C-alpha cells in the first residue's frame, strides 16, 4: 500500500497534547475491538444495493430488506446502530471519504498479520510479510503495557484466528490469549469451561477456530472476573464471509459485531472501576476491493484495500463526531491505546507513530 501523507507538525502537537491530557487524568481502562476486513464503504455508507442478490422476479431479497435504507446515514445506522448512535455521538470517527478524510494502513501489503502488527507495534515492518504463525519480533503496545506498573497481568486478548498468539508473541509477552477452540485460555470456573465447550460444540466451519460468539463470551468472562485494564477482542467472521463472496452473511456478521461491541461496552459501564473510566477503540486491519468484482478480496494487488476506518470514545476523547479533512493511519493506534491508558508508548518504542489527533 502506498504510504499515507506524513503527519503534519500541527497534528503531532495536537497528538502530544492529547497524550498529556490522558496522563494527567490518570489514564483509563482501554477496550480494543477489531472487525477484520470490514470495508470503509459499509462502515460509513451501510449496505451497497448493487451487491445484493435479487429474487427471481427482481424483488428485494431478505438481506436487502434487512439492511437497505434511503440515504447512507440511515443505512449505516441500520447496519451498526451502536457505533453510529453511541460511539460516533460521544467520540470520534476517522476515515470518512465524504468528509475529506482518510484512514489506512502503511505496510504496503493490505492483509491481516501486517495490519495487526502495524496496529499494535505502531509501525509497519517488512519482516511481517505473510500470515504465517511466526512470533512477532516487535514489542506490541499490549506487551509493553503488560510489563508496566499497574498493568502487569491485567492485559488480555481474545480472537478466533489462531495467528493471534503469534501476533502478540505470547511466549515472550506473557499475555493470556483465548483463541482457536479454547476461547478461555485458563478455564477456572464452570462458566469458563462452558464457553470452551460451546466453541467445541459448534460446527468446525473454519478449521482454525469458531465463530465470534464464544470469543466474545470469553472476553466478557475475563472482564467480569479478571478485570483487565486493557482488553483486546478480535472479531473475524465478516472477513471470512466476504472471502466467500457472501455479502448477506458479511452484513449479518457486521451487525452482530456491533451488538457484541455494545454488549462489552455495557458490561464495562455496569462495573465499578470501569464506568466512566473506560475508553473504546474500534478499527479494522485492512480494507477490501472497491468494486463488485473485487470487494471480496484484499492484498497489495487489490486497489483500495489499504483504506480503513477508526472510531474512538472515552473520557479523554472530545465528542467531535465524524472528523473532517484529516488523514490518519493504523500505525497511530498503538500510541493511542497507551495514551488513553495514561502511558507514553513512544518512550519505549520511538519508531511508533504519534497518537491519533483526537484533541480539539
Image (cartoon, rainbow, N blue to C red):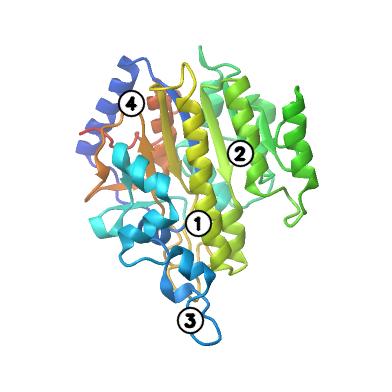
**Residue at position x 44%, y 34% from top?**
334
Checking the image for residue 216, the label placed there is 2
Cα separation, mark 2 vs mark 4, equals 24 Å
Name the residue tied to disc 3.
Answer: 59
Q: Earlier in the sequence, mark 3 or mark 2?
A: 3
**Real-space CA distance between mark 3 and mark 4, rounded to the nearest whole angstrom:** 46 Å
For disc 1, the marked residue is: 110
Task: Between residue 120 and residue 38, name the one nearer to us.
Answer: 38
Residue 359, placed above or below residue 21: below
* Sequence-first tag of 2 and 1: 1
Disc 3/disc 2 C-alpha distance (Å):
36 Å
Disc 4: which residue: 315
Residue 286 in the image, given as x and y percentages of width and height: 48, 54
Asked which secondary structure carries label 2, the reply is helix
Give the residue displayed 57% in from the left and 26% down from the top.
223
Residue 50, image x and y in percent?
Answer: 43, 76
Q: Looking at the image, is 122 positioned above or below residue 20?
A: below
Q: Earlier in the sequence, mark 3 or mark 4?
A: 3
First of labels 3, 1 by sequence position: 3
Amino acid at each position: 500500500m502506498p504510504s499515507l501523507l506524513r503527519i503534519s507538525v500541527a497534528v503531532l502537537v495536537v497528538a502530544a497534547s492529547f497524550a498529556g491530557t490522558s496522563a494527567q487524568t490518570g489514564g483509563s481502562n482501554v477496550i480494543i475491538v477489531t472487525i477484520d476486513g470490514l470495508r470503509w464503504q459499509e462502515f460509513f455508507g451501510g449496505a451497497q444495493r448493487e451487491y445484493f442478490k435479487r429474487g427471481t422476479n427482481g424483488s428485494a431479497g431478505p438481506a436487502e430488506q434487512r439492511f437497505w435504507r434511503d440515504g447512507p446515514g440511515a443505512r449505516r445506522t441500520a447496519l451498526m446502530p451502536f457505533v453510529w448512535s453511541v460511539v460516533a455521538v460521544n467520540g470520534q470517527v476517522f476515515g470518512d471519504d465524504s468528509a475529506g478524510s482518510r484512514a489506512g494502513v502503511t505496510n504496503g501489503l493490505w492483509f491481516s498479520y501486517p495490519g495487526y502488527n502495524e496496529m499494535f507495534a505502531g509501525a509497519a515492518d517488512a519482516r511481517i510479510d505473510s500470515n504465517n504463525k511466526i512470533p512477532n519480533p516487535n514489542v506490541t503496545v499490549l506487551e509493553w503495557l503488560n510489563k508496566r506498573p499497574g498493568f502487569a497481568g491485567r492485559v488480555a486478548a481474545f480472537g478466533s484466528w489462531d495467528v493471534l498468539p503469534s501476533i502478540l508473541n505470547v511466549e515472550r509477552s506473557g499475555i493470556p490469549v483465548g483463541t482457536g477452540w479454547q476461547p478461555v485460555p485458563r478455564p477456572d470456573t464452570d462458566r469458563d469451561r462452558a464457553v470452551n465447550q460451546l466453541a467445541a460444540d459448534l460446527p468446525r466451519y473454519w478449521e482454525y477456530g469458531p465463530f465470534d460468539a464464544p470469543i466474545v463470551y470469553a472476553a466478557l468472562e475475563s472482564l467480569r472476573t479478571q478485570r483487565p485494564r486493557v482488553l483486546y477482542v478480535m472479531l473475524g467472521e465478516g472477513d471470512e464471509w466476504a472471502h466467500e463472496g457472501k455479502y448477506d452473511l458479511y452484513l449479518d456478521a457486521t451487525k452482530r459485531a456491533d451488538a457484541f461491541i455494545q454488549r462489552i461496552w455495557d458490561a464495562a459501564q455496569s462495573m465499578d472501576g470501569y464506568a466512566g473510566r473506560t475508553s473504546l477503540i474500534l478499527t479494522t486491519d485492512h480494507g477490501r476491493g472497491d468494486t463488485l468484482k473485487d470487494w471480496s478480496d484484499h492484498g497489495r494487488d487489490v486497489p483500495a484495500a489499504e483504506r480503513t476506518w477508526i472510531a474512538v470514545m472515552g473520557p479523554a476523547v472530545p465528542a467531535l463526531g465524524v472528523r473532517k479533512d484529516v488523514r490518519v493511519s493504523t500505525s497511530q493506534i498503538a500510541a493511542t491505546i497507551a495514551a488513553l491508558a495514561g502511558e507514553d508508548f513512544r518512550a519505549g518504542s520511538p519508531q511508533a507513530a504519534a497518537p491519533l489527533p483526537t484533541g480539539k
